[in-house]
Amino acid sequence: MGRKKKERPALEGLFSTISQMLVPAHVLEHFEVWGAEEYPDRWEIEMREKAGRIPAELSAYSDVVSDGYTNPLCTLSHSFVCKPIYLRLYRRRYKRTNSDEHFSNEYDVTLKGVKMVPELGFFLKDEG
């Protein structure tokens, strides 16, 4: 008799679900959530490029090493609880051993000329 108690989901599954709510799928394809911070006027979600995504220019070489991250790209994702949410995207830098020339991947994560994800831009355009 009575209802069966529902088990609380594992935190990793819950984290994954919340990430999918706040970050567009095409960004999660290449980046993973690294952290999040609240500021008085905004939220920022820090994202780091997934490991092993070696740029095409270096794919033929075996002496490729990761060399930190590029300066972050910052893009408006959407607004939530009256504060905008920005994605701070860090792309990995790669180089060949004994070389100073760096390479990184390019991702189409913003609308041209506007620092916001395409989903938000298309939504705002439809509203106008």
Image: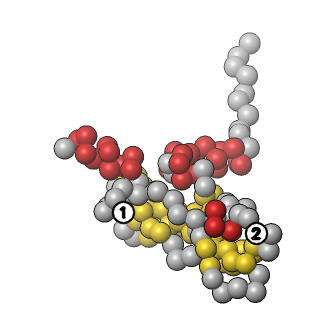
The front one of 17 and 32 is 32
Amino acid at the residue labelled 2: Tyr
Q: Nearer the viewer, mark 2 or mark 1?
A: 2
The front one of 40 and 42 is 42
Whether residue 88 is visible to the viewer of this picture, yes or no, is yes
The image's colouring method is secondary structure
Q: Which residue is mark 2?
A: 61
The answer to whether 104 appears left or right of 127 in the picture is: right
C-alpha span from label 2 to label 1: 34 Å
| Outermost residue to the top | 1
| Residue 46 found in image quarter | bottom right
The answer to whether 114 appears left or right of 43 in the picture is: left
| Residue 1 found in image quarter | top right
Label 2's element? loop
Q: Which mark is residue 73?
A: none
Label 1's element? loop
The front one of 104 and 16 is 104
Residue 86 at x, y percent in the picture: 44, 62
Residue at coordinates 27% horizontally, 47% vertically from top-left? 124
Residue contact between numbered discs 2 and 1, judged by CB atoms under 8 Å: no
On-image quarter of the C terminus: top left
Residue 102 at x, y percent in the picture: 62, 79
Whether residue 51 is visible to the viewer of this picture, yes or no, is no
Residue at coordinates 71% horizontally, 63% vertically from top-left? 59
Q: Which residue is mark 1?
A: 115
Examine the rendered structure and indicate whether residue 36 appears above or below residue 127.
below
| Outermost residue to the left | 128
The front one of 101 and 67 is 101
Q: Categorize mark 2 by other alpha carbons within 10 Å: few (<14), some (14-19), many (20+).
A: few
